[in-house]
Amino acid sequence: MKKINFFLSFIIYALLMMGNISAQSHSSVQGKLEAKKTARVFSDFLESNTFGLSPARYLKTASPGFDKSTYYDREKGFFYFIDRNGRTIQSFNLRELNLEHPGHMAWNPDGTMVLASIYNLNKGRSKPLYLFKMDGSIQEVVSAEGHDEQILQPCWSFDGKWFAYLKSSRANGHEINIKKIDSDKEIPVNNRPIGQGYCGNPVWFNTKYKLLYKKGQRNRPNPLHEELWIYDLATKQDKKIYEGIIGTSFPIISPDDSLIGLNGYNYFMVMNENGKIVNRFKIQGLYPSWSPDGLKLAYKYTKVEPIHGEVIRDAIYCVTIDDGTKTNLTPIEGLKIGEYRWLDNQTIIYE
């Protein structure tokens, strides 16, 4: 009988231990959502920075894998690809080509090329779009016609085979186009002639050849209203999905493409691809960003002194999509945050 009791006790103890291990394992998988200074995550982060580059500036133009970023030395006229340690990977002599001031930039998905809008001094103040490659080559991929035409807001498709951009000029207004990386053919998406409003702010979906963009029109009942449109590259058709106040420069699309997020009037709204609002949150923040699993949103909140407008502190908040629960990830008095990025589902890095 004692042997049986001992055996039963051992079985119960083993089961309890297995349950405990299982709970610990589940907890470690779920993890605790944290915001960390970048140097705490990457041990080689700007240890010997030869450019005097700030960590926030590195994050601002970092590649998707955070292993590279860009830097423009205005005094020397060079554009650089640099690593996390602040060392040069590749350099481009822009002054030699009579180019200056790289503007809107976009890394391709695998972090090997950058599209950048740059002033070409041979063409007045126009801004063609250039492609910078890791081998040191530079290619003009979209020319700018006339004295003031600018190619802006470049963005890559999910597979890096296509890119979209905005053409803007005083003479011709606004025009959104798409090009294949190995083709000279432009595919028109939408255009607004001068004096008839605007279109712009293109954003690719993450898993399909669809492009989200904004459009505004003049001489309408409510001039503050903007429109959201989706262009389908496969069918060459576009459709309007939303009209109202849009406070977000670039609406954000969830990783699985099921949801679109944007700031509306007093609320942050989450809608599906057909424009149906599925949730809204009362948040006061800037630069909203989806978590990699699409279950959470992060945003930057800035508390400002009401009389003089001085920043008192910044904070990174996270809100869960299902129930709208908000959490302050950086409850630090006097904290000032320049940039933040999701590293994984449980970690946000910031500077």
Image (cartoon, rainbow, N blue to C red):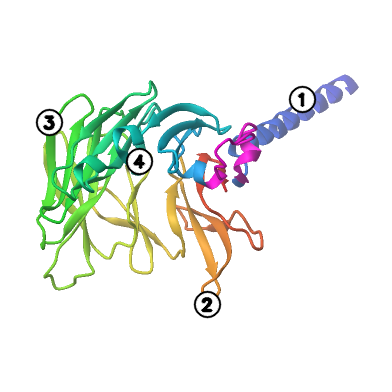
Q: Can residue 205 be seen in this view?
A: no
Q: Name the residue under label 3.
A: 185
- How busy is the neighbourhood of tag 4: few (under 14 within 10 Å), some, or many (20 plus)? many
| Mark toward the start of the polypeptide (3 vs 1) | 1
Instruction: Assess whether residue 89 is covered by the magenta stretch.
Output: no
Q: Amino acid under label 3? A: Lys
Mark 2 residue element: loop
What's the distance in space between the residues labelled 2 and 3, CA to CA?
Answer: 52 Å
What's the distance in space between the residues labelled 3 and 4, CA to CA?
Answer: 21 Å
| Mark toward the start of the polypeptide (4 vs 1) | 1
Location of residue 300 in the rendering, given as x and y in whole percent from the top left corner? 50, 57
Range of residues picked out in magenta: 36-56
Q: Indicate the quadrant where residue 3 lies.
A: top right
| Mark toward the start of the polypeptide (2 vs 4) | 4
- How busy is the neighbourhood of tag 1: few (under 14 within 10 Å), some, or many (20 plus)? few
Mark 4 residue element: strand
Front in this rendered view, residue 344 or 319: 344
Q: Mark 4 points at which residue?
A: 105
Q: Name the residue under label 2.
A: 306
Q: Amino acid under label 4? A: Met
Q: Judge depth for marks 4 and 1 and give the one in front.
A: 4
| Mark toward the start of the polypeptide (2 vs 1) | 1
Q: Judge depth for marks 3 and 1 and give the one in front.
A: 3
